[in-house]
Amino acid sequence: MRLGVLVLALAFLALAQYVVETPAAVEGGNCVVGYLPPKFSVSVEHDGVIYLWADRPVEVSIYYASGSVQQSSGTELRLEVGARDVVVVRNLHNTGVVYTACRGEPRLPIGLADYGIAMTNPPVAYSYETREVRAFASLKNFDAYSVNEKFRGFSIQLNLVVMVGTDGKTQYYLLQNVVDLWDFWINFVNNIWNLTAVEGVMRSYAIKGTGVVRDEKFYARALNPEYLSLPISVALYIRVGLSRDGQPWFAFGYDVGRGVVWYDNVTLLVKARDVKIVVRPPREGLTGSGHQMNIELVVCGICRGDHAVFKSLNLDLRLEYWNGTAYVPPPFLYNFGSNTGETAEGVSVAYLGGGSARLSAGVFRPALLYSGYVPVWVVDADGARWLAVRNGTLLDLRRPP
């Protein structure tokens, strides 16, 4: 039989360049979500407890430093290992396995994130560029404790990576538009970090805005706190572009129901060819500092690597980017971020559709949250191949005339 896929769907996918890729993995904090092809294995090293989840049973062998070997299998495993012990996870099936492994309890920023690769079976990789990302948050109530700062509160962060093309080299920057919520206060903050190198620095003479450069590490702007009254709905915006004289600029905005307030417009004092927000799969490389090129909307601690523990939460999040003609949700979404030092626990994420999710108090497990496309194995007169087909596409299974 010949498998025909709707011509419209194929034309769109050719433009978007969705490709099937194996093996693959997405890392965040102390966790990794990965794909094991048939008969493949992967090793995990850690001194402590490893939590492992898989979408079908996997075989696990622990090679202890003493020389003994312990074997087990299943879809949910808790493994206790030492610093010199090695854990090997094997896929014995004839089809792929999607797994999640965490070195200890998951400690990640939690919410919505697009990494340029979906851990479907097999994975689908893609990339895109944009000039604007926006996020929406509707908060009814919360009870969260800030572990490091010792107060009641948390933050909502919109984080993304910007690529700046100069004559010398490509530069990368992490842009953060943040809502801090603590006790009875709300505040808006932005940060800019140089991700071009491992020890990327920020010089005050090379950047211009209404904020300041702190310790030559990052740029920051913080508004004055205002009284917090719940419920509250907030929108966050990040927009990038080039000035008339070729200098890249980053605009940060928020909206609490009275229109968008662009509270900081930052210019890099360097000549550039272009500037763009980028999402790339890990196989296409990371930033010079090793960060993944993703966009994320997450809840976590407020600052300085803070950790937020949630006892109750009623929060809806929505993430969108401008595709040139309209705001659209990312094609794939995970429930965890990676490009911030702040983390959270005690949050459950339920996908609502349209790039939206509901966050509530509960058990968290890192995972792919939503797949906009599914891989389809096609065998016809032209041979055998994978296609990435939009979720919900009508497939026409007919013999050729």
Image (cartoon, rainbow, N blue to C red):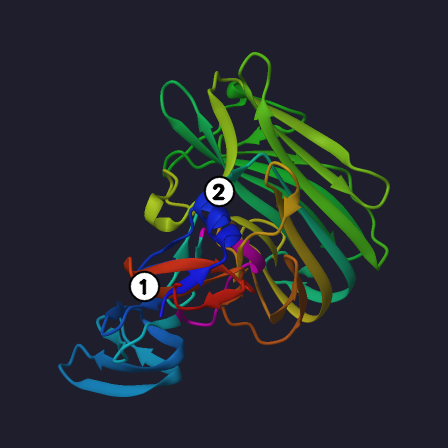
Camera sees residue 110: yes
**Relative height, residue 101 to residue 113 (above, below):** below
Q: Which residue is mark 2?
A: 128
* Residue that lies at the very extreme toward the left in this rendered image: 67
Instruction: Pick whichever of labels 2 and 1 is earlier in the sequence.
Output: 2
> Is 148 or 29 nearer to us in this picture?
29
Q: Which residue is mark 1?
A: 380
The percent coordinates of residue 150 (x first, y second) are 65, 60
**Label 2's element?**
strand
Q: Is residue 101 magenta?
A: yes
**Count the marks: how many?**
2
The region drawn magenta spans 100-116
State the residue at coordinates (36%, 20%).
Answer: 168
Camera sees residue 293: no
> Is 299 or 211 nearer to us in this picture?
299
Label 2 sits on what residue type? Answer: Tyr
The percent coordinates of residue 20 (x first, y second) are 36, 57
